[in-house]
Amino acid sequence: MFRFRFFIIALFLYTLFPRAYALTPAELHTVGSKRDADAGIISTSSSPFAKLHGIPPRAVHLGDGFWKKRFTVNIERSIPTFFTLLNDVGARDKLLGRKNKARGNSDADLAKWVEAASFALQSQDNRRLRDMLQRVVNDILISSAENGYLHTRYLKRMPANLAKSRTSGDLYCLGHLIQASIAHYRATGDKQVLNVLTPYIDNVIELFGPGKQSCWSGHPEIEMALVELYRTTGKKEYLDFVRFLLDEVNYGEIEREHETDFEHYFAGLPFRFRKELSGHAVCALYKCCGAADYYLETGDKEVWLALMGLWDDLAKYKMYVTGGVGSRPWDEAIGNRYELPNERGYAETCAAIGNVMWNWRLLHAGGEARFADIMELALYNGVLSGVSIDGDKYFYWNPLRSKSDLAQEGYDEGTKDLLALKKEKGISLNIRQRYYRTPCCIPNIQRMIASLPGYMYSTSAEGLWIHLYDSSRLNWHLENGKKLTLRQDTRYPWGNTVEITFESAPAEDFSLFFRIPGWTTSAKVNINGSFFCVIHNPGHYHEIRRSWEKNDRVEIVFDMPVRVVHANPYVRENLGCAAIQRGPLIYCVESTDHQDVSVFDIVLPLNLSDLSQGFEVKFEPNLLGGIVTIMSDVLARGPVSSDEKLYSFERFPKASRPVKMTAIPYFAWANRGRSEMEVWIPWTVKE
Amino acid sequence: MFRFRFFIIALFLYTLFPRAYALTPAELHTVGSKRDADAGIISTSSSPFAKLHGIPPRAVHLGDGFWKKRFTVNIERSIPTFFTLLNDVGARDKLLGRKNKARGNSDADLAKWVEAASFALQSQDNRRLRDMLQRVVNDILISSAENGYLHTRYLKRMPANLAKSRTSGDLYCLGHLIQASIAHYRATGDKQVLNVLTPYIDNVIELFGPGKQSCWSGHPEIEMALVELYRTTGKKEYLDFVRFLLDEVNYGEIEREHETDFEHYFAGLPFRFRKELSGHAVCALYKCCGAADYYLETGDKEVWLALMGLWDDLAKYKMYVTGGVGSRPWDEAIGNRYELPNERGYAETCAAIGNVMWNWRLLHAGGEARFADIMELALYNGVLSGVSIDGDKYFYWNPLRSKSDLAQEGYDEGTKDLLALKKEKGISLNIRQRYYRTPCCIPNIQRMIASLPGYMYSTSAEGLWIHLYDSSRLNWHLENGKKLTLRQDTRYPWGNTVEITFESAPAEDFSLFFRIPGWTTSAKVNINGSFFCVIHNPGHYHEIRRSWEKNDRVEIVFDMPVRVVHANPYVRENLGCAAIQRGPLIYCVESTDHQDVSVFDIVLPLNLSDLSQGFEVKFEPNLLGGIVTIMSDVLARGPVSSDEKLYSFERFPKASRPVKMTAIPYFAWANRGRSEMEVWIPWTVKE
């Protein structure tokens, strides 16, 4: 009790001197071992089965391109406003054991927020953010000081009691706290949070496992966190524990009681035997992330084969054209093969993020572009649609069609109390919310955008890899330690040209690998202004090996037509419909741009022999933060008579009214008030 | 306590002499007032705003046609086997207050079963059924004897306590018990159950209502039950209470606490202000039934206008082509306009039954054929699909497409304990179940089929109305009391000819009204072998007024081609697809009949200028109890390569492989083991 009072006093003193624990800008990035400070989003520099190795976000400085705007809004608006919301709902109070008002998993939301803030600080020193971060870090330290363990709803128990409650989110929260402590450590060199967690984790490892108490992970998350902890500490016990969790063979009575939950949590079957993705979309994808991390450390071939089978299952049968995942709103689950409802799917923002994280891990194994292609698709579409352009409103669901009134839980502007959310009636699916009852997606997209610079490049023994195109400056080194500075200038994804300039390069042969995305038909490459080659087989990394010199300039011009996407006819929802894609961006039609026609009346007349279709592409600098719109002359059904039947023995009249269609990128919808939206548009043969 | 022991002893004695309370066949139908014995499914003989008046089921004797088989299986197999199941799950024990094992609303299941058995006994004296019925009736009597009120989970409380629990099903169960007591009384003349319920109901009426305690009905059902009780007893208080419930204006604090449930239960808004159907499908439709009953007694124009608006909303926007209702499995709700998913809809059997019951009530108002058309459509398709051909396996959901593994709760053959149902994993949607955790649909379809003879004919001041066609003999009278006997001979819906023969008729002018169904193009009428007329405007009742004589014979020949049904293009699920209909029957393709092709690969080549399409129609006496199949030469996609993409910039190959398609009536699917099924089939222009 005395010790507790001491910490209350310490807390009081801290509020008087808020900078007392905070690091100065100079301290940032200078502490910790070199390996930790240099770690990428995941630290595969010593992973024996990773061909690629990440680059820390701080090594990449975003230029004035597509992501810079989002990155800045994320730091200046998204991350701070969510800090305030977490405060308001009592998540910090709960962490401190003061109140129990916040929802169950709020520790995980706070932890993801810590990760987001830590990644952001790697790239940009921001005093306000640093102070906020330090306040949460101090919360964690204070709350854990009393009994040597964290003291929150989930973690206030001694680890020995985990067995009684581990389906309820213990290990999920613990996993997020581990990731947060690692991100914080890598950003600041401050090991305090990690040190506080370690005895708790070690106790878990000691109590559970093969031949000890049985255990399963509940909502997957702890798997990837523990592999990263293994990468950070070198303690093999953590990796072994992940294998134990992935093998799921040591179930005891308590687990058997939860057998009906197994399908939902993607549990109950050794991961290596998995053939199909199923259950809760985020659970399934997070477990795949953990398994991929495990593979990178162990080279377990059975796990890799399972991963490849599951990846095929997703890419060939179960993924939305936006990279979103999750077809069934009622249990937030992945559906059957080809079950991809547009209006009633749920495609949680967290699931699209899980898709990016999984493909990022798979990409590290061998540098296969198919993984980066899906990563890019999900990032620009299913993930980015999760946050508003102004950065403080979000989507939990990301349907591909929105009529108006299908509801999700949300926070109504008129509601004073954030926790008094409209559960039953919900919030319309086409209105972004500042807060959701389960706000998991909010800090998740914040950490994704904050860490984005770390997803752009990798190194391998052969040289440098470029995964994502955006204006940026890389200040890094080859794997032999020799310094390399490189600039990307591009208006990608609006423009189709990328210029890569070496600002400094070691005087030796090394390879530049750059991705030729699957969405292009061909790419023309010039080096230092001279024609170099045309690449006709997209969907791979093109390698150019030479002794690069300062001011060497590679220009890549992607063929970037507007393309019409057809879905497999087994996806009955999309039969007779087409989607519009340009570059990595999926487009949609939104009612806001169509005064004379309902978006659901639009019919695309397609010229089947000429795929260029006469779409008009235009950059609109003042629209939705600056986007490329796609316009076209299309047809529409006439204004529908109120007597129109639901079913008829006659064919319904064909669309014949000429109208102008304006399509915008899917990610940008629902930023101009309530609207209706459609991705898959009915088409007809152009006559 | 002594009184309770007395009843236990009485129960014991009763088991020794099970026939002690039972009525002899001679007693059946002979007791009770003439009005009660003569009542139709609903008794509108004195309803001032009912143009039509029902006929008791016992006045119609089914001949050897379509429904006779189902009617017989219902009595010989369905009703008795469900009695055993209700026993097994403890529903009777619960009613007797002995055990509390059965699920909450089991009183309602028992009550619906009593209704089913009572209707069945009107048509067919069946000793086994009579004994079973008497046992349940005795249960009710015994359970209620102790304190003057029924003694079950819901009704054991004094009515005064209703206020604390009325969202949980009290009034729903009470409503079903009222309907059961009325059906039992009408079938047997035995008023005991009605007498036991009356004080309970009267107490409810006394305690709640305008100016008294506030109240709402929870799951609607009590409304139609109380109108029928008003019709049976003449007590206006019951009708007033229904108005009070429909107006929903007297909510107190307790109701406001349940405000979030209002949308689900179709409550919270005065019925007269309703414009759209929403919420739980069965709740919405049952409330519409109650409101229609209320209209027939009061002529309340606002209620009628609301009913017509809601009917339009259903018929034009929200009904499956099978007459099924309910698009959202996650809350069993009616969806948005045009939201009609085939695989993931739920279309509960009870909702299709609610659709029949509602249209039956609306039909009574003015004899409009559009109501009878939907009633027929739902009966032959969305309702009848709810029970297996052998009569003891059921569907709770009735999707229009079934791939295999989308699950609903059900009873696995391997499960010993009926209540230990597979909740999470569920039962595949394409396997009929003997029992469901919520088995409401089972006794509901039993009472529907048991009462079916009562849906075939009505009378009005002008004469006799024929709503449904089936071989049958009507032994009844005109509204002036003059005897009329008439025979229908037909193979409908397999055959297109109906022969109506007067076996006896009063010597006076009266009208015969017969329905020209909306699905036909024309109907040819002959009288006594001579041409009479051709009717070109289907969808109305054709009236022939004359002095009919014994042996007068009316032959109606319906044009009954195979017709291709198109859905409004706003139903995106059905875009590019067509359904097949012949007569009132919607057809489907089932994998069982297609060895060489997946039903999901079938494409219909349609000749747009010739709608007859060359379908081959064939009666198969030994298939599925005798059905007409529809065969056609169609196209199929080639065997799908495992490398086939989910999305492509190229069009997917057209179907070009010629195959033979066999379609069966939708109601008959899933009777030959596990299968895949499709109603809406992609079509292409025939080249």
Image (cartoon, coloured by chain):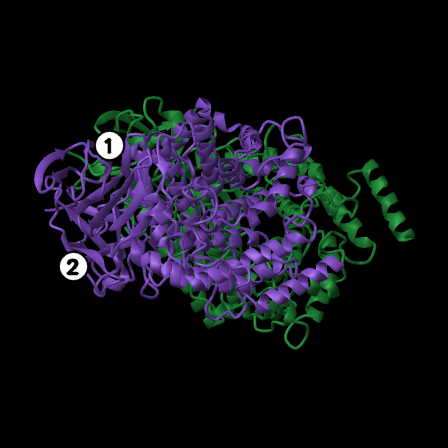
Chain colours: A green, B purple
Closest to the camera, between mark 1 and mark 2, is 1
Camera-side residue of B601 and B188: B188
Specify the amino acid type for callout 1.
Phe
Mark 2, secondary structure of its residue: strand
Q: Position of residue B59 (x, y in %)?
A: 34, 47
Q: Position of residue A81 (x, y in %)?
A: 63, 34
Chain letter for the residue marked with disc 2 in the picture: B
Quadrant housing residue A343 = top left
Is A495 positioned to the left or the right of B212 in the image?
left
| Kind of residue at badge 2 | Val
Q: Nearer the viewer, residue A303 or A669?
A: A669
Contact flag, marks 1 and 2 (Cβ < 8 Å): no
Q: Position of residue A281 (x, y in %)?
A: 49, 53
Q: Residue at x 37, y 53 (%)?
A: B123
Q: Secondary structure at mark 1?
A: strand
Name the N-terminal-most of marks 1 and 2: 1
The residue positioned 70% from the left and 36% from the top of the image is: A88
Residue highlighted by disc 2: B659
Q: Which residue is mark 1?
A: B510
State whether residue A59 appears in this view. no
Residue B574 lies, with reference to residue A671, above or below; the image says: below
In the displayed structure, A317 sits above or below A275; it is above
The span from disc 1 to disc 2 (Cα, nearest Å) is: 54 Å
Residue A16: % across, % down: 83, 36
Please identify the quarter of the rendering in which residue A400 is found.
Answer: top left
